[in-house]
Image (tube, rainbow, N blue to C red):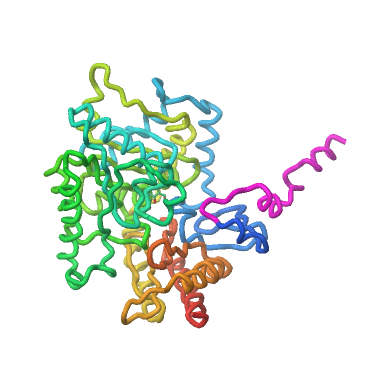
Amino acid sequence: MGNEIAMTSSEAELDLQQAAKDHLWLHFTRMSAYGKSDVPVIVRGEGAYVYDDKGRRYLDGLAGLFVSQVGHGRTEIAAAAAKQGSELAYFPLWSYAHPSAIKLADRLAGLAPGDLNRVFFTTSGSEAVESAWKLAKAYFKQKGEPTRYKVLSRELAYHGTSMGALAITGLAAIKPDFEPLPPGGVRVPNTNFYRAPGFVAHDLDQFGIWAADEIERAILREGPESVAAVYLEPVQNSGGCFPPPPGYFQRVREICDRHGVLMVSDEVICAFGRLGHYFGAERYGYVPDIITFAKGVTSGYSPLGGMIVRDEIMEPFLSGTATFLHGVTFAGHPVSTAVALANLDVFEAEDLLGNVRKNEAGFRATLEKLNDLPIVGDVRGAGYFYGIELVKDKATRETFDDDESERLLRGFLSHALFDAGLVCRADDRGDPVIQLSPPLICTQEHFDEIEQILRATLSEAWKRL
Ligand SMILES: Cc1ncc(COP(=O)(O)O)c(C=O)c1O
């Protein structure tokens, strides 16, 4: 009898497909798309692969959402979560500390470049980005420069969705529904060399100088006394993986120093091995004032984000009554910080940074084979982080119009790539791109599988145009 009741009310009896359609609201998703077709339900993961409710296997070419650095199904990380949960499942970082948060802060301070020694935890990347803006404003008020509040960020750059983070995000198309946003977001050019303005299109170094100097011009235009910070990803994700030209970050650092503006390296994607280093700033040889992180710090085994801050930024908050009046309940959660420590243990034990550095040339070379397809305009990126830009005309670099983009990316490619067994992202928030960011455990066999699926599916897409 007891068993019967358990059976009828058990999860196993629930029609997941129908319940998802009836009750679950998917993020950034046209829910109408699932009127007739099934919601993909992913039930399990192992290594670089995930499995759906029908038992089909997919290569996770996006690490979930730029998250699963160590791959799926790591029982040692799950065990660390269980151990922490049974010892101390929750306590806030509001006036208290707990061992996992302390140990993780200490470890991150040791890994971060320069004198970035202070860690403020959040639960997500958007919160980290927004916290850094609040910190920049509060810091300048402490320093007697209360008029600094504006933030510069690059065209198309995605920095999150909460109101403050959205004001920093450079994707115009995702903002109008939520306006007015907090004032102070200012756009500067990104480092998309493939779409560089004509006068610098043939010289990467000159392009980099121009793009960096545009930041200075924007600071001067806005008035340096009004500008608090510049947000930059080491490799910009949105728009399709724009690496920095040589010397770009060094020049931006000088510009920030010249005008007293804080440099924020938004490493929500680029940290924790994505570029073969713990931090992208290390790869490109600059020391920012603040690093924001999330995603890979736990490889997704539990949510966590945060910012790492230079000593100088912390300094005004270390004396008297000065207080950073900011915090969230679950930031630096004991389970998440314990998970992050276990995640970093895996990085060390398996030399995942070494794996990325050893294999990244192979990843690039494998993806570059796709250059022989008429639809592939550009293959760009670094580490295990690549974008493939799709074009209508390779010679002129002409892109697709809205209707073609709709048919190609939403109507065909997204589903076809998934059906062919690859999780990746077909994104048209800038020019249409396929984004790839596989788990850091991947090797040549995975790159070959990605290339084969892309080759077949992109060839089919071309025929359908
Ligand atoms: C560079 C960058 N910043 C911030 C965010 C926002 O992070 P979250 O989705 O955890 O709020 C993202 C998310 O993809 C990101 O890529």
Q: Quadrant of residue 134?
A: top left
Residue at the front extreme? Answer: 180
Q: Is residue 19 rendered magenta in the image? A: yes
Residue 122 pos. (x, y %): 41, 35
Give left or right: position of 346 versus 90.
Answer: left
Residue 336 pos. (x, y %): 47, 36
Q: Quadrant of residue 264?
A: top left
**Residue at 52% of width from left, 80% of height from top?**
464
| Residue 345 in view of the camera | no
Residue at the top extreme? Answer: 320
Quick one: 288 or 409, which is closer to the camera? 409
Q: Is residue 334 above or below residue 379?
A: above
Q: Which residues are magenta?
A: 1-29
Residue at the right extreme? Answer: 1
**Residue at 33% of width from left, 36% of height from top?**
107
Instruction: Count the marks.
Output: 0
Residue 426 pos. (x, y %): 47, 65
**Residue at 32% of width from left, 55% of height from top?**
276
Give left or right: position of 424 versus 367.
Answer: right
Q: Quadrant of residue 154?
A: bottom left
Q: Is residue 342 rendered magenta in the image? A: no
Residue 404 pos. (x, y %): 47, 74
Quick one: 249 or 108, which is closer to the camera? 249
| Residue 383 in view of the camera | yes
Quick one: 98 or 127, which is closer to the camera? 127
**Residue at 26% of width from left, 61% of height from top?**
191
- Magenta portion: prevailing SS class: helix
Q: Is residue 208 above or below residue 374?
A: above
Give left or right: position of 108 versus 14.
Answer: left
Q: Quadrant of the N terminus?
A: top right
